[in-house]
Image (cartoon, rainbow, N blue to C red):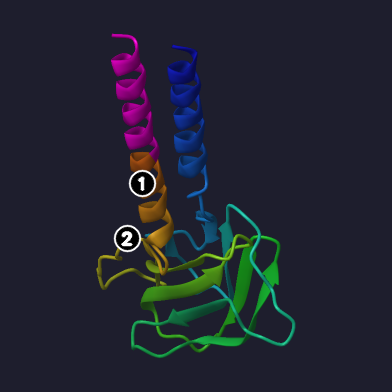
C-alpha cells in the first residue's frame, strides 16, 4: 500500500510540474491597446509581455511591424527591447484608419510568440472599420503536447503499480 501511495504522489507531482512548464510570455499591456481609438496617430508604440524578452548581441530575434490602413509599414528604426517591453517608432506621415501591429518575440524561456492586433487612429473616426482581436500563436506547440504525454505516461504507470499491488495483496 505504501508503494501505491508513493506512486500516486510522484504521479501527481510530475503532472503538476509538466503543467507549469508550459507557461510562456504573453501580452500584459500595450500602447495603443487592442481596439483603441486614438487621436492623434501615435509616434511610438510598445507591447509589454509577462516575462523578459531575449536579446542576442548582433541578432534581431524580436520584431514588431506597424502597418497603416493603406498597407504600408510605418514603423522605422530597430525596435528597442527593455526587459519585457518591445518599443518602436511610428512615422508621422501615416494614413489614418485601422493600424495592424504584427509582432514576433522570443521569451527568456526560448519560446517564440507571434501574433497581431489592431487599433484605430484617426482624427474624426468617420470611416468605421472593425479592428481584429489579438491573435497569438506559438511557433513551437510541442511543449504542451509533451506535457500531456508525460502526464498520460505517469498515470499509466500509476495504474500499473496499483494493479500490481492489488494482485499481490490477494
Asked if residue 143 lies left or right of residue 31, the reply is: left
Q: Which residue is mark 2?
A: 133
Residue occupying the point 51% across, 54% down: 24
Asked if residue 129 lies left or right of residue 23, the reply is: left
Q: For residue 114, which quarter of the picture?
A: bottom left
Image quadrant where one finds the C terminus: top left
Q: Outermost residue toward the right? A: 57
Label 1's element?
A: helix
Vertical order, 131 against 29 (above or below): below
Asked whether 30 or 82 is in front, the reply is 82
User: Residue 26: x percent and y percent?
Assistant: 50, 55
Which span of residues is magenta-colored? 154-170
Predominant SS along the magenta part: helix
Vertical order, 23 against 162 (above or below): below
What is the distance, in whole Å, between disc 2 and disc 1 at their CAs? 28 Å
Label 2's element?
A: loop
Residue occupying the point 69% across, 74% down: 55
User: Residue 122: x percent and y percent?
Assistant: 40, 73
Residue occupying the point 48% across, 43% down: 18
On whether residue 155 falls in the magenta region, the answer is yes
Q: Mark 2 Cα within 10 Å, few/some/many (few <14, many 20+)?
A: few
Q: Mark 1 Cα within 10 Å, few/some/many (few <14, many 20+)?
A: some
Image quadrant where one finds the N terminus: top left
User: Residue 21: x percent and y percent?
Assistant: 52, 47
Asked whether 17 or 52 is in front, the reply is 17
Q: For residue 46, which quarter of the picture?
A: bottom right
Of mark 2 and mark 1, the one earlier in the sequence is: 2
Q: Which residue is mark 1?
A: 148
Asked whether 67 or 150 is in front, the reply is 150
Asked if residue 147 lies left or right of residue 77, the reply is: left
Residue occupying the point 30% across, 22% down: 163
On whether residue 94 falls in the magenta region, the answer is no
Amino acid at each position: 500500500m505504501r508503494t501505491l501511495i508513493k506512486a500516486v504522489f510522484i504521479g501527481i507531482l510530475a503532472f503538476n510540474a509538466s503543467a507549469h512548464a508550459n507557461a510562456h510570455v504573453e501580452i500584459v499591456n500595450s500602447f495603443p491597446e487592442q481596439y483603441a481609438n486614438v487621436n492623434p496617430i501615435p509616434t511610438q508604440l510598445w507591447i509589454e509581455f509577462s516575462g523578459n524578452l531575449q536579446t542576442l548581441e548582433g541578432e534581431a530575434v524580436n520584431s514588431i511591424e506597424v502597418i497603416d490602413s493603406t498597407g504600408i509599414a510605418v514603423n522605422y528604426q530597430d525596435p528597442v527591447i527593455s526587459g519585457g517591453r518591445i518599443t518602436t517608432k511610428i512615422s508621422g506621415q501615416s494614413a489614418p484608419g485601422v493600424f495592424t501591429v504584427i509582432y514576433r518575440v522570443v521569451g527568456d524561456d526560448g519560446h517564440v510568440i507571434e501574433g497581431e492586433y489592431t487599433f484605430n487612429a484617426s482624427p474624426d473616426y468617420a470611416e468605421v472599420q472593425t479592428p481584429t482581436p489579438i491573435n497569438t500563436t506559438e511557433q513551437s506547440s510541442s511543449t504542451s503536447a509533451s506535457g500531456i504525454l508525460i502526464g498520460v505516461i505517469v498515470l499509466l504507470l500509476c495504474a500499473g503499480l496499483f494493479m500490481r499491488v492489488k494482485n499481490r495483496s490477494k
